[in-house]
Image: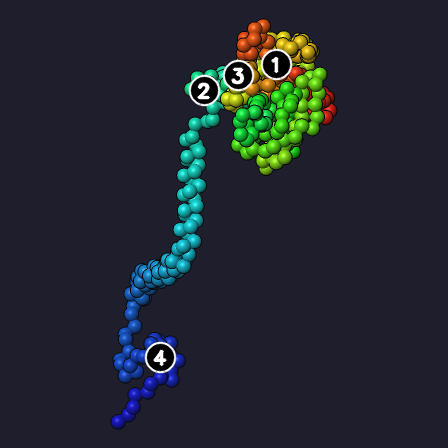
């Protein structure tokens, strides 16, 4: 039996016969050639199927691109959360600042009203109280100790007041407070007690200087102020231990300057004294006369009483601090 040839040797047959598609059965009968019109219509309809193919091909890479985007979001999720929080915070802060009212500019009227309201609502300490708070740590009580016939042991024979003028225990007082004392004892503001020795005297001004044997660690010296700045009517306080009671504070004004005083015995005349009307009594002697800044302007030395009661009737005298500073060996003002 004669075999059918796979390929025709005829050139005509090779052109007329379409090429077999890969995988086609060689034994299958050849398809009849379509007419020219049918071929053109077939070629015209072919783009429809080929046009559909790019759409499917173009949509195919979309899935991997979205997948990569989702993966990037997952990898940087924390960073994106932080950035989102920062942006949100900045936005909220901007909105809050935009909604805040503009600060009000204070006027002098507002300030005066605030000061007046504070003064009405809060009671301020008096000038006398402030002055006493300054001088209090520097005031000491002075006691004369001695023996009295018929009494056993040491007894208190006199009481007065002193002022610490140097923080090493130098104390200023009146001479008549310590004159004739067997022993002098001082009590400081903190309650500590020490013996003291008389180191200097100035009889013409009734002044004496003491040196304490032991002193507190935090002893405060008084601030001294020249009496040349005083005027009649200036407020002052007198601090001391009248009749041993104290410390006591009395207030008044400067009543006169450059006064003279003769002692009741007529033996001494003190000059250039400061006259004041703050109450003073026996025991105030040697204490400070203080201005409203807490500065010592004089040393209380005497009271005027035409009678023999020895009590205050409205006129007291103080030695100007210039004389007292000179007695203590300090530079005069």
**Residue identified by numbered label 4:** 13
**Residue identified by numbered label 3:** 250
Q: In the displayed orientation, state which residue is furthest to the bottom.
A: 1
Q: Horizontal placement of 246 versus 21: left or right?
A: right
Q: What secondary structure is marked by label 2?
A: loop
- Circle 3 crowding by C-alpha within 10 Å: few under 14, some 14–19, many from 20: some
Q: Position of residue 129 (x, y in %)?
A: 51, 21
Residues at marks 2 and 3, CA–CA distance in whole angstroms: 21 Å
- Circle 4 crowding by C-alpha within 10 Å: few under 14, some 14–19, many from 20: few
The mark total stands at 4
Q: Position of residue 71 (x, y in %)?
A: 38, 60
**Residue identified by numbered label 1:** 302
Up-down relation of residue 143 to residue 116 (above or below): below
Residues at marks 1 and 4, CA–CA distance in whole angstroms: 160 Å
Residue 141 visible, this orientation: no
Sequence order check, earlier mark of 2 and 4: 4
Residues at marks 4 and 3, CA–CA distance in whole angstroms: 148 Å
Q: Quadrant of residue 186?
A: top right
Q: In the displayed orientation, state which residue is furthest to the front.
A: 150
Q: Horizontal placement of 113 versus 315: left or right?
A: left
Residues at marks 1 and 3, CA–CA distance in whole angstroms: 15 Å
Up-down relation of residue 7 to residue 142 (above or below): below
Q: Position of residue 63 (x, y in %)?
A: 35, 60
Sequence order check, earlier mark of 1 and 4: 4
**Residue identified by numbered label 2:** 123
Residues at marks 2 and 4, CA–CA distance in whole angstroms: 130 Å
Q: Quadrant of residue 300?
A: top right
Tag 2–tag 1 contact (CB < 8 Å): no
> Which one is closest to the eye, mark 2 or mark 1?
1
Q: Horizontal placement of 85 versus 105: left or right?
A: left
Q: Quadrant of residue 58?
A: bottom left
Residues at marks 2 and 1, CA–CA distance in whole angstroms: 35 Å
């Amino acid at each position: 039996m004669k075999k059918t040839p796979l390929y025709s040797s005829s050139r005509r047959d090779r052109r007329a016969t379409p090429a077999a598609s890969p995988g086609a059965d060689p034994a299958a009968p050849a398809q009849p050639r379509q007419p020219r019109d049918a071929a053109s219509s077939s070629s015209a309809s072919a783009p429809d199927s080929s046009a559909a193919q790019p759409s499917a091909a173009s949509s195919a890479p979309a899935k991997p691109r979205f997948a990569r985007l989702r993966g990037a979001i997952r990898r940087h999720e924390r960073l994106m959360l932080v950035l989102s929080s920062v942006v949100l915070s900045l936005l909220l802060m901007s909105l809050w600042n935009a909604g805040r009212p503009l600060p009000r500019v204070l006027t002098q009227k507002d300030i005066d009203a605030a000061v007046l309201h504070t003064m009405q609502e809060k009671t301020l300490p008096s000038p006398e109280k402030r002055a006493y708070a300054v001088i209090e740590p520097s005031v000491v009580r002075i006691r004369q100790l001695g023996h009295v016939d018929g009494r056993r042991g040491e007894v208190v024979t006199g009481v007065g007041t002193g002022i610490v003028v140097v923080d090493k225990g130098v104390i200023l007082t009146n001479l008549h407070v310590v004159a004739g004392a067997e022993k002098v004892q001082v009590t400081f503001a903190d309650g500590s007690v020490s013996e003291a020795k008389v180191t200097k005297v100035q009889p013409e001004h009734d002044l004496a200087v003491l040196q304490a044997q032991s002193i507190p660690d935090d002893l405060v010296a008084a601030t001294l102020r020249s009496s040349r700045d005083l005027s009649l009517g200036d407020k002052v306080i007198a601090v001391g231990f009248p009749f041993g009671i104290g410390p006591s504070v009395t207030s008044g004004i400067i009543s006169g300057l450059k006064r003279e005083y003769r002692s009741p015995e007529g033996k001494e005349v003190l000059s250039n004294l400061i006259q004041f009307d703050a109450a003073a009594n026996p025991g105030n002697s040697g204490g400070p006369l203080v201005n409203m800044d807490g500065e010592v302007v004089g040393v209380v030395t005497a009271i005027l009483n035409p009678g023999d009661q020895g009590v205050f009737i409205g006129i007291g005298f103080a030695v100007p601090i210039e004389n007292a500073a000179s007695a203590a060996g300090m530079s005069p003002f």
